[in-house]
Amino acid sequence: MPPSFRLALSAAVLAAMALLPTSTASATTARAETLLSQGKPATSSSVEASGFEAAKAVDGDAATRWASAEGHDPEWISLDLGTTAAITRIKLTWEAAYGKAYRIQTSADGSTWTDIYTTSTGNGATDDLTVSGSGRHIRMYGTARGTPYGYSLWEFEVYGTAGGSDATPPSTPGNLRATGTTASTVSLAWNASTDNVGVTGYEIYRGSTLLTTVTGTTHTDTGLTPSTGYTYTVKARDAVGNTSSAAGPVTATTQPGGSGPAVPFGSHTIPYAAGMLRPSGDQATLDQKVIDYYKRWKAAFVKQNCGNGWYQVISPDADHPYVAEAQGYGMVITATMAGADPDAKKIFDGLVKYMLAHPSSINPDLLAAEQNTSCQSVNGTDGATDGDMDVAYGLLLADRQWGSAGTYNYRNLAIKHINAIKKDELNPGTNLLKLGDWTSSGDEYYYISRASDWMVDHFRAFRKATGDTTWDTVRTAHQNVIASLQSTYAPNTGLLPDFVVNTNTTPKPAPGKVLEDPNDGSYWWNSCRVPWRIGDDAVTSGDAKSLAAARKLNTWIRSKTGGDPNKIAIGYRLNGTQISSGSDAAYFAPFAVAAMTDSGSQSWLDALWNKMLTTPIDTGSYFAASIQLQTMITVSGNHWVP
């Protein structure tokens, strides 16, 4: 609906709603609270259009408003008060598009949230709420719209006392215990603490080192050494930052090396973000379908053609019989399928041995991109970014699965690989990935990047493994370029081009052939992977930017095809014009991951899943088969970030 018509409707609806009683959480008689929210930084999950930004809800102007994207749940608007505050009152002045079900939440850090008010019976107009909570950040988190549109607030007012007044720490967590160990992990659990305002998280310490803060009452410590004792304590924290005394200590000893995987395929011990869909049907059936496809993929593409104890993933449809991209796919897939395939570790180690025997001539901690039929590196023997990204990620998965005390120290190899990517495959001026280690300052490729290399969940894993905050900067840079390209060059489709040029000034789609094909500036044989790559981060992290990008792609392709996966073509211009007819798993499968992010796409996701199940594996295309298998792993709930 056009914003001008919405404004007219808003006036009419507000006039009618003025006759309704004002919603309150309790009596709202005269208060002496201070208005804390006006002019404070505001962000939101989405914006309907220019002029409806989150800041409009805290500008003190009753004629301006924030509005979310229409027709989607959940959506949120969040405020940063700048300092911890004791919050006593919330006043929401709704436009016609109101929240029927929503939560008011507080947070000390903007990531761990505590509900201080919930409702499922909102009726719009003005909600003037008496609450009790404390935090620096506060948000309205809408879970069900009251109209077909979105969520829209004329004003979001927060009242209370800056600085807070809570000095009472939470109670000590109870019964800290080790619930399980592997060769490389210790799993912990404890009983929940209580607090006069609310517990926002638990700090987990190994010895005197703070490992992480979690919101639940369990945690698994990873990357440990076999047959080694580790001592843990846990403290509860509230919204103001008060911490309890430590629970514990408790000591646990990891198992000897060689035990089974820490995250067996089908265990589903690492949950996705809230609200992500999966195909209809019971979980065991979904998992078995993935295993069946994996067996066919393994039989077709995982080989030992060159001796030396090596395993390779063959690439019959590529320019060379062995390419780094295929080896990276193989390492990620094999580590993920551990538990379903008893030979997973043996195959993975054979892939590692092959990788180490084929170093890039530019940076020996990277993998040479191409080998001939004799498994000899050729064509410059330099590295390709996409293969190296997956090699590093696969090594981190292996470290989590089996620990690093065996034949190969997976963790050390992963960190070497990650640091080499940073040194020679990342442009230090733009913080965007280069095409490979072979391009350098001054050449024609230095400011070109490939959108399908932008693996946001990998950046998160690299940051966690190395502690290097550069990877946070890199992640943000890529997400910003994704949003800019979608908004500027594909506002109706969300499609990204195969290659992006001018990354040092204003990134834009390639104007024609810059590396591979006249369609380098279109959604073609590289960017067909983008819905899967963006979607992997969206479903695992719940990141607002990744969700928005994935949902834009999903909304367009679902509409373009009328909900029929058979109509997904081979290639599109960024405006949505079809390039080629036909159907290929490399194009239709990735859209299933994007579909997981939209609560209204269950039937569409089911149709895509069934399309994958009924399409025979193409044993002549490692590319399509490997993409479909990794898509199926994610869609079935089995993708995880180490």
Image (cartoon, grey):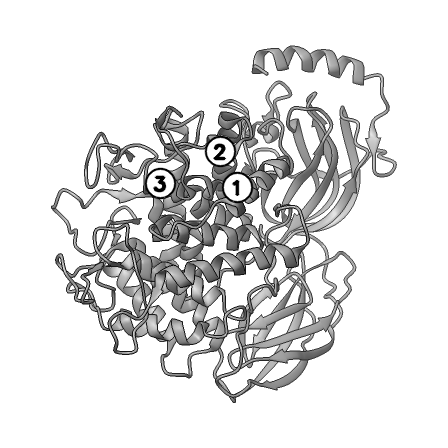
Q: SS class of the residue under badge 2? A: helix
- Residue at 58% of width from left, 55% of height from top? 637
Q: SS class of the residue under badge 1? A: helix
| Of the image marks 2 and 3, the number of the one nearer the N terminus | 3
| Of the image marks 1 and 3, the number of the one nearer the N terminus | 3
Q: Give the labeled residue for mark 2.
A: 566
Q: Give the labeled residue for mark 1.
A: 611
Q: Give x and y (percent) for residue 115.
A: 73, 49
Q: Amino acid at mark 1?
A: Lys
Q: Amino acid at mark 3?
A: Ser
From the viewer's perspective, is 633 left or right of 252?
Answer: left
Q: SS class of the residue under badge 3? A: helix
Frontmost residue, 173 versus 617: 617
From the viewer's perspective, is 355 left or right of 100?
Answer: left
Q: Are marks 1 and 3 in contact (CB under 8 Å)?
A: no
Q: Give the labeled residue for mark 3.
A: 527
Q: Is residue 578 visible?
A: yes
Q: Give x and y (percent) for residue 293.
A: 49, 56
Q: Quadrant of residue 299?
A: bottom left
Q: Amino acid at mark 2?
A: Asn
Q: Are marks 2 and 1 in contact (CB under 8 Å)?
A: yes
Instruction: Report crowding for label 1: few under 14, some 14 to 19, many 20 or more residues within 10 A (C-alpha).
Output: some
Q: Give x and y (percent) for residue 303.
A: 33, 67
